[in-house]
Image (spheres, rainbow, N blue to C red):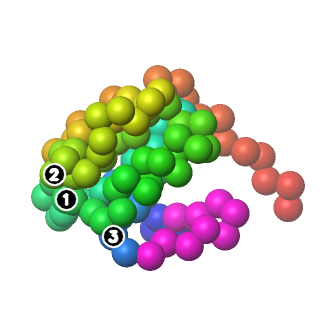
Amino acid sequence: DVHVNIVGGGRIDGPSAGVAISLAIVSALQKRGIHQQVAVTGEISISGRVKAVGGIFEKAYGARQAGIKKVLIPAENIKDIPPDLHGMEIVPIESFAEAIPHVMKDVEIIPEVSQE
């Protein structure tokens, strides 16, 4: 079984967190960390294709306000991002596999010791 816990009580509304949640699952299974300065959005199809989502400009702007330097977005949404989003690297992706090298660290995650 896989249990995904959204830190801080965050709310997920719609499919746009699909790629991010899938990356979190791969991170846990492979015991690899995720770079914290990368934001990801996109719906993921059953075949691993990354599909367009709404509110892409607002998501990228919010990421920039939070200090994020790189945002992975569905390739179909690239038209929704102005070219002058200063200080941001916008990476259009078409498949889930394309996202992995942008976000995964090559170091093994050290599991926390339970205090129970």
- Which image quadrant is residue 11 in? bottom right
Contact (CB < 8 A) between labels 3 and 1?
A: yes
**Given the current orientation, which residue lies at the most extreme top position?**
106
Badge number at residue 76: 2
Disc 2 versus disc 1: nearer the observer: 2
Disc 3 versus disc 2: nearer the observer: 2
Q: Which residue is mark 3?
A: 15
Q: Is residue 4 above or below residue 14?
A: above
Q: Residue type at mark 1: give it.
A: Lys
Tell whether position 104 is magenta. Answer: no
Name which residue lies at 53% across and 24% down.
107
- Which quarter of the image is occupied by the C terminus? bottom right
User: Residue 74's x, y, as percent?
Assistant: 24, 50
Task: Read off the magenta span.
Answer: 4-13
Taking the image as shown, residue 66 lies to the left or right of residue 34, namely: right
SS of the residue under disc 3: helix
> Visible in this render: residue 22?
no
Callout 1 environment at 10 Å: few (<14), some (14 to 19), or many (20+)?
Answer: many
SS of the residue under disc 2: helix
User: Residue 61's x, y, as percent?
Assistant: 47, 48
- Measured Cα–Cα span from mark 2 to mark 1: 7 Å
Taking the image as shown, residue 11 lies to the left or right of residue 60, namely: right
Badge number at residue 51: 1
User: Residue 12's x, y, as percent?
Assistant: 49, 72
